[in-house]
Image (cartoon, rainbow, N blue to C red):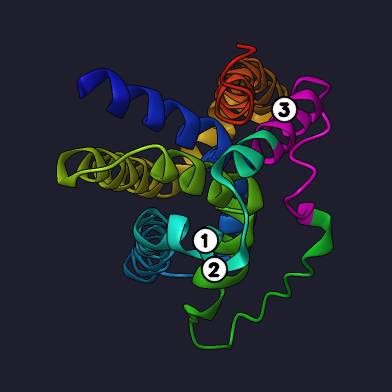
């Protein structure tokens, strides 16, 4: 059980990658008090946990309603995750997440602090996008029983807490790592994600072709 939680947490960390959202968080909360920044970070991370929980519980049911087999979704999801990992290793970021340049964040020092941007675009799709949601559905479709479902939910809770801590330390992390450090971290996470994607693809092939693999 502990190994499963660690494996799922690893997949969530490299897919959600809160470090990629640090600059956006700083821009969105420019001029905010510490209390307001905490509120934005808290709402964003609660949104991440709710999203993970929803697709953990309802993911397999959604696949059945759409007439998609678990093996087919594993194979498609694994390929998607592998493409994401290639882009991350090439320093091109996550292709299924929007570029930060696409968000025009205007700062008005007279405007009251707003938490509306905590859900969109900060939590969705900047932190948990199609790749993360697909991975949640894939892992949830492979498990059964309360204990195993709880493992995914615990992993989701832990990664949400990790995202909260990363956002609250956004200024210090950005100054410490800089653009070069964040780029190196993204490439390392891309390598780890590639290994996760291969496991997902192999699992999908085993499900579709049990006699061949």
Q: Which residue is mark 2?
A: 65
Is 132 placed left or right of 160 in the picture? right
Q: Earlier in the sequence, mark 2 or mark 3?
A: 2
Q: Which residue is mark 3?
A: 82
What is the x, y in percent for residue 8? 39, 31
- Seen in the picture, residue 205 relative to 13 is either above or below; the reply is above
Q: Residue at x 35, y 48 (%)?
A: 160
Between the C-alphas of marks 2 and 3, the distance is: 26 Å
Q: Quadrant of the C terminus?
A: top right
Say what secondary structure mark 1 lies in: helix
Between the C-alphas of marks 2 and 1, the distance is: 4 Å
80 in magenta: yes
132 in magenta: no
What is the x, y in percent for residue 72? 66, 41
Between the C-alphas of marks 1 and 3, the distance is: 24 Å
Q: Which residue is mark 1?
A: 64
Say what secondary structure mark 2 lies in: helix
Q: Residue at x 38, y 31 (%)?
A: 9
Which contiguous range is marked in magenta?
A: 76-100
Instruction: Say whether residue 160 is visible.
Output: yes
Give neighbour class at mark 2: few <14, some 14-19, many 20+ (Cα, 10 Å). Answer: few
Magenta: main secondary structure:
helix
């Amino acid at each position: 059980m502990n190994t499963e939680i660690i494996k799922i947490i690893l997949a969530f960390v490299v897919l959600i990658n809160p470090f990629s959202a640090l600059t956006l968080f700083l821009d969105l909360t420019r001029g905010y008090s510490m209390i307001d920044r905490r509120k934005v970070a808290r709402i964003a991370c609660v949104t991440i946990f709710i999203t993970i929980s929803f697709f953990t519980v309802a993911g397999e049911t959604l696949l059945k309603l759409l007439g998609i087999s678990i093996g087919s979704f594993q194979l498609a999801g694994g390929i998607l995750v592998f493409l994401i990992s290639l882009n991350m290793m090439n320093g091109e970021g996550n292709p299924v997440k929007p570029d930060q340049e696409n968000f025009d964040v205007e700062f008005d020092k007279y405007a009251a602090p707003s938490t509306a941007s905590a859900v969109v675009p900060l939590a969705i799709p900047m932190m948990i996008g199609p790749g993360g949601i697909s991975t949640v559905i894939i892992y949830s479709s492979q498990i059964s029983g309360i204990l195993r479902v709880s493992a995914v939910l615990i992993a989701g809770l832990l990664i949400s807490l990790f995202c909260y801590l990363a956002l609250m330390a956004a200024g210090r992390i950005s100054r410490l790592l800089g653009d070069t450090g964040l780029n190196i971290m993204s490439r390392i996470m891309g390598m780890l994600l590639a290994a996760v994607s291969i496991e997902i693809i192999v699992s999908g092939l085993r499900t579709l072709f049990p006699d061949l693999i």
